[in-house]
Every structure is written in structure tokens, then in C-alpha cells.
Image: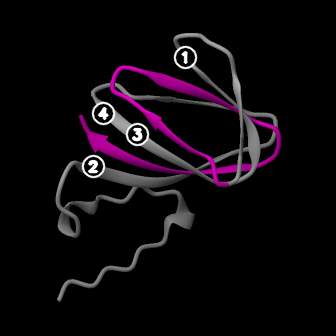
Amino acid sequence: MNDHLVNLNDGAPIDPAGVLRGAWQGFVLQRVAAGARHRLDADGVEHLVYVVAGSGTASATAGGEPVRFAEGTAFTIVRGDGVRFEADEPVELFVATLRA
């Protein structure tokens, strides 16, 4: 049996290759300070993003109207796209990266 216990709170990316099969490339918990901006690009990969805590606005880097997000919101970012997050309060994002 392969048992693995990881702590995402230190901010270090996790390589799931030894535990999961499929296109999973990595997992990380990213924090965005209140009032700060964070850009997440999907160059050659895809991202699944889950808002663990906090709220703010997100907008596609290619343009378009910003959308509000809060704890519990999920995003997908397809290969070649990107999202800018602006935090109203401290935000925690769980990011799963997949090989595209």
C-alpha cells in the first residue's frame, strides 16, 4: 500500500506522479494578499482552481468582464488562456495543474 500525507500549507508544489495516474502534473495552495493581484497562465497546461477562502474578482487575461468569486468558487483555465485574480481580502487558491 502506498500511503502519502502532504501539507499544502507550506506553499510548496506537490508532484502527484507517484500517487495518481493520468494527466495530473501538480498541486499547490497559492495565497493572494488582500488588495493584491495574481496572474495564473495556462501555457502548455490546464488549471483547475478552487477558491478555498476569500473573495475578489477574476478576469480572463484576453479581456472580458471581470466576475466576482468567493469561497467555494471553481474555475477551469484552458491551455493558452489565463486569469487575473484581484483579492478583496486574503485569498487561498487550490490549483491543480494538468498536462494539456
Question: In which quadrant will I find the C terminus?
Answer: top left
Query: From mark 3 to mark 1, how far is it between C-alphas?
Result: 14 Å
Report which residue position mark 1 lands on: 61
Residues in magenta, as a range = 72-100
Dot 1 or dot 2: first in sequence order is: 2
For the residue labelled by badge 1, is the local secondary structure a helix, a strand or a loop? loop
Tell me the mark number nearer the camera, choosing from 2 and 3: 3
Dot 3 or dot 1: first in sequence order is: 3
For the residue labelled by badge 3, is the local secondary structure a helix, a strand or a loop? strand
CB of mark 1 within 8 Å of CB of mark 4? Answer: no
Query: From mark 1 to mark 4, how far is it between C-alphas?
Result: 16 Å
Dot 4 or dot 2: first in sequence order is: 2
Q: Amino acid at mark 3?
A: His
Report which residue position mark 3 lands on: 47
For the residue labelled by badge 4, is the local secondary structure a helix, a strand or a loop? strand
CB of mark 4 within 8 Å of CB of mark 2? Answer: yes
Q: Position of residue 20 (x, y in %)?
A: 22, 65
Farthest residue, direction bottom: 1
Dot label at residue 25: 2
Query: From mark 1 to mark 2, how far is it between C-alphas?
Result: 23 Å
CB of mark 4 within 8 Å of CB of mark 3? Answer: yes
Q: Position of residue 95 (x, y in %)?
A: 47, 48
Q: Position of residue 9 (x, y in %)?
A: 56, 66
Report which residue position mark 4 lands on: 45
